[in-house]
Image (cartoon, rainbow, N blue to C red):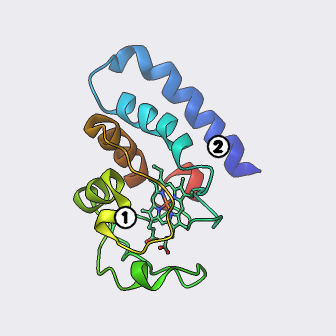
Amino acid sequence: MRAHVAAAACLAALLALRPAVSFSGGDDTVTAGEQLYVLCSGCHAPTWNRTGPRHCGLAGRRAGSLADFDYTPAMKNADIIWTRESLDEFLRAPLTMVPGTSMAFAGMPDARERDQLITFLLQLTDKHPLCR
Ligand code: HEC
């Protein structure tokens, strides 16, 4: 509950800052990425496992490594560390990068949208209000 209040306060602060940062990247990229997360939220949430594994702590995580999620062997054995570069390749065409993955998502062809979404995903560390 407290985390939600903090998240709301943080969002309000971000919104208040928006005119100052205008369209020059930074916060606007994160905001756009967070909006694009609707493409994922049918199966994923930041903090808990759904059809897909949670995304908090994704940056630097080894693919298929959450102990409490039942991955396919394809994902477990993919030998990928999630970084901006690997996420970009994966989200462009998941089944091409990880043949046999059960992630039923065709991919995001738009490089700018991938960039925005990945910027949001990489913020989901234990410092992010959604992940505390
Ligand atoms: C139809 C459901 C579905 C959708 C939509 C979906 N995913 Fe997934 N995702 C999964 C499943 C299931 C897995 C586990 C795949 C496996 O074990 O092969 C997964 C795995 C992942 C992983 C690997 C995580 C890890 O712990 O190694 C990442 C990263 C990921 N998804 C990102 C995304 C993003 C970003 C989106 C939105 C653009 C998205 N997914 C959309 C179902 C989905």
Q: Which residue does the image show at 28% across and 35% down from the upper left?
A: 112
At a point 52% along the width and 43% down the height, the residue shown is 39
Q: Which mark is residue 6?
A: 2
Q: Nearer the viewer, residue 115 or 23?
A: 115
Residue name at image x 50 percent, y 52 percent:
128
- Which residue does the image show at 55% across and 85% down from the upper left? 67
**Label number found at residue 49:** none
Instruction: Classify mark 1 as within 8 Å of ligand 1 or not, answering yes or no.
Output: no
Compared with 69, 53 (above or below) is above
- Report the front residue among 111 and 27: 111
Q: Quadrant of residue 81?
A: bottom left
- Label 1 – label 2 distance at C-alpha: 37 Å
Crowding near pointer 1: few (<14 within 10 Å), some, many (20+)? Answer: some
User: Could you say whether the residue bearing mark 1 is in a helix, strand or loop?
Assistant: helix
Amino acid on which disc 2 is placed: Ala
Q: Mark 1 and 2 residues: CB-CB less than 8 Å, in contact? A: no
From the viewer's perspective, tell me whether residue 86 is left or right of residue 63: left
Q: Give residue 40's position: percent from left, percent from top.
A: 53, 50
User: Type of residue at label 1?
Assistant: Leu
Image coordinates of residue 42 in percent, x first then y, are 63, 50
- The quarter of the picture where residue 84 lies is bottom left
Q: Is residue 107 above or below residue 77?
A: above
Query: Residue 90 location, x and y as percent?
Result: 32, 60
Residue at disc 2, CB closer than 8 Å to ligand 1? no
Nearer to us of marks 1 and 2 is 1
Whichever of labels 1 and 2 marks the residue nearer the N terminus, that label is 2
Question: How many numbered marks appear?
Answer: 2
Disc 1 designates what residue? 95
